Structure formats: structure tokens, C-alpha cells
Amino acid sequence: MQPLVLVIDDEERYRTLYAETLRQAGFRVETAESADRAAELLRGVRPDMIVSDVRMPGTDGISFLTRITGEHPGMPYLLITAYADIRDAVRALKLGAVDYLEKPVDLDELVSAVSDALHVPPPRTTDAVPPELMQDIVAESQAMRVLLGDAHRVAQSDATVLITGESGAGKEVLAAFIHRCGVRRDKPFLALNCAAIPATLLASELFGHERGAFTGAVTRRNGIFREADTGTLFLDEIGDMPMDLQPALLRAIETGRVLPLGSDRDVAVNVRLIAATNKDLAARVRTGQFREDLYYRLNVIAFDVPPLRERRDDILPLARHFLVRRKGPPKRLSPATVGILQSYPWPGNSRELANAMERAGILASTEVILPEHLPAAIARQKPGPAADSAPNAAGESVRTMQEIEDDAIRRALDQTGGNRTRAAELLSISRRALIYKLKRMGIK
């Protein structure tokens, strides 16, 4: 019989997310919305392990840990904590907790931590996404396939998602993909760029207004929260939201209610929120430019879209995809153009590539796109070698730093029998850093 895990969290959407993730990994799961409810369950059920949030109403996770170590000595206890709770987490480890995970929780890391604590092999999982959900998405690189696999899993819950990445990397594409994979797929998906709306109008765009609420408000407006009701709301460039609006957004997330401008009655809304930014929100929190409580509310499940230069396997498929979707006769890339596209660093990411292909498709009078049809800044790029390893002066192959790192990770896993916690200790990195590197390598 598979091990039984008790998940304790006062927020239903996170409790459900963690429970479903562990069930998909093959564990049996019971859930409790509080430590007191967990104590009731323990009178009739003895789990093999407890996974608990730290901050909960009533008895907190650490106080419950103290109780469990006395009543059920030896029962593995894993804590999930926000950054602000790290001191509590360290104290919990001294009290007997087997480990702690920082929010936002990486779901693979959760499964790995539970597997390690229970001394069971991690399950074999697949990140395969049904083809019908991959509409207009090109993902040949391992990094993007892993990212989409994780997003597909998270889409089944209503947990808030924060997407980070450089401008043009595809954050809105990922947000739309999550919506398409979720239970709200038949409901609205609405997007708002917080940086594109003047600060004086942003509150009205978000929460709506009543007629006469301000000069020029001649009609009533619902606002995008109400327009997206029952669906998904995507707030792009959330890092640019003015500080004076952030408390209202935090309240909307916490209570599911918005207060239109000029109204004395708030309105209930039911949306799945996805936010995105190209800014370092943690740094903005430290400098007082972003509310810490709002940051933690948004940063429940986090995805970082890698820049195009770090997923070169996607460059040519994306370029051909952009050529196919434009109107006009079919076009193909010359070998010289292929070399340039593969070597160029793409600071503007997929958006820059799409614009380059649109321009080239227009300028090319024949079916072949030549370097001269590319924007000047791109066309000046000299084609580089296709090989991953460059020869040294003696003609011998030189291993890249990436190859050396990957080899060290594999050897650490071999030496620890696949135990990721101990492997991370051998490598002198955090378990989370190891999980991310394993995903990049395609190791689950």
C-alpha cells in the first residue's frame, strides 16, 4: 500500500493543489484545513507523513509540530513556508521537522521531498501535454517542454500564478496556455497591461466606476475584474502597478470582492488571477516599490520563461512558425539566414523574431529569405558554429561549463542513490536550485 500523507493548509486552493500533486505521484492523501482538524483526523488515521503550512489561524504549523513530535515520535513532518518565515523554519528543523519548502512551492520539489523523507523512489512522471492544447505554441527545447508540462499540471487548480521573464519572451502565451488547460477554459480570458494605462485611469480599468464618480465618468463601467468573472484575468507588467493601487488589488485577491470607484457597495468576483512581470519583484519589495504582502499573494506558483537565447532549439521552429502564419506565399530560410538566426542573441526574444520574420517575408521577392531581408542589426550577426563544444588550439574538444555542471550533478545523484536532498548537499547548492537544474537537464 502506498504511503499516506496528511496535508494541512488553511487555504483550500493551495491545499487542493498540494494534495492533487501528491496523488498524481502515487501517494494516498488526507487533507485538513487547520491543525485542530488534523488532530481530529489523527485519532482515527495514522499518516506516514505530514505536510503543513506554517502560518494558519489558531494553532500554527510549528506549534503543531511540537505536539506531533511528542505524540507521534518519528513521524516525518515537512513545512511549507513563505520567505518571511525562514527563521521559524530553521527553528522547526531543530524541533524535528525533516525539511521545509519555500513558497512558491515547486511541485516537483514537493514530490521529491516527500519521496526522500519516506525513503521511496520518486515516481516516473511525464510532462507530455495533449497536442490539442498546444495551439500556436512552439516548444522544441527541453526547457520549454518542462515549463509547459508544469504549467499544464498547475492549470487544474485555481492557485494564483506569477510569471516572470524578459520582455517578449512569451509570458502572455504561457498565461493563455494555463487558462486553456484549466477548468475555466470555456470562460473569458482577459488581459490588461498595467504599464499601458495611465495611473489615474488604472483603478477604473481594474475595478470599474459608477456614473459621476469623477469628471468625465458619464456612464457606468464594470472594470476588467467583473468582465472576467468566472474566467481568468491576466495582469501583465504587475511590477509597474502604482503603490496606491496595490492595497485594493490585495483586497480583491484576499476577499474576492472589488469596490468600484464612486460606489459604497463592493461586488463579488470569481476570477483565476495570473500576473506577469519583467521586473525583479523581490528587489522592488526591498526598495519599497512593491508591497510585500501583495508579492506573497501573487507568488504562490511561479514560472520563469527563459529568454530565447537560452533555448536555441526553439529559434528555427519559431521562425518557420512565424513565416507560415503570415499572409502571402510560402517562404523558406536560406542556409546563411539560418546560421545568422541561430547565432543572434535575440535581446527582444520571440517578439523580435516574429517582427524580423514579418519584415523578411514582406521584403523577400522570391520564396527564399536571404540575410539582406533581415533587419540590419540582425543581418550583421556573423554565423557561429553549430557545435556545443569548441575545439582548443590543439584541436581537442573543450567541454563547456554547462557540460561540466551536468556531469557533476549526475555523479552526485549516483553517489547518493538518487536522493536529491543529499545530492544538493554534496554540490553545495539548495535543493530548489538542484530541482531547477534537473528540469533543465530533462531529469525528473
Image: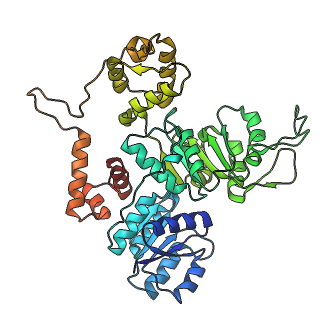
- Please state which of residues 17 and 132 is positioned toward the viewer in this rendering: 132
Residue 63 seen from this side: yes
- The residue under the point 58% across, 59% down is 157
Tell me if 255 is positioned left or right of 442 in this view: right
Q: Taking 28 as reference, is 194 above or below it?
A: above
Q: Taking 287 as reference, is 15 above or below it?
A: below
Number of numbered discs overlaid on the protein picture = 0
Q: Position of residue 44 (x, y in %)?
A: 53, 89
- The residue under the point 65% across, 53% down is 184
Q: Position of residue 124 (x, y in %)?
A: 35, 62
Q: How is the image coloured?
A: rainbow
Q: Identify the residue at the far front of this view.
A: 329
Q: Position of residue 98 (x, y in %)?
A: 38, 72
Residue 88 seen from this side: no
- Please state which of residues 93 and 335 is positioned toward the viewer in this rendering: 335
Q: Identify the residue at the far left of this view.
A: 394
Q: Quadrant of residue 34?
A: bottom right
Q: Quadrant of residue 193?
A: top right
Q: Position of residue 166 (x, y in %)?
A: 49, 35
- Please state which of residues 26 and 293 is positioned toward the viewer in this rendering: 26
Name the image quarter holding the N terminus: bottom left
- The residue under the point 46% across, 38% down is 138
Name the image quarter holding the C terminus: bottom left
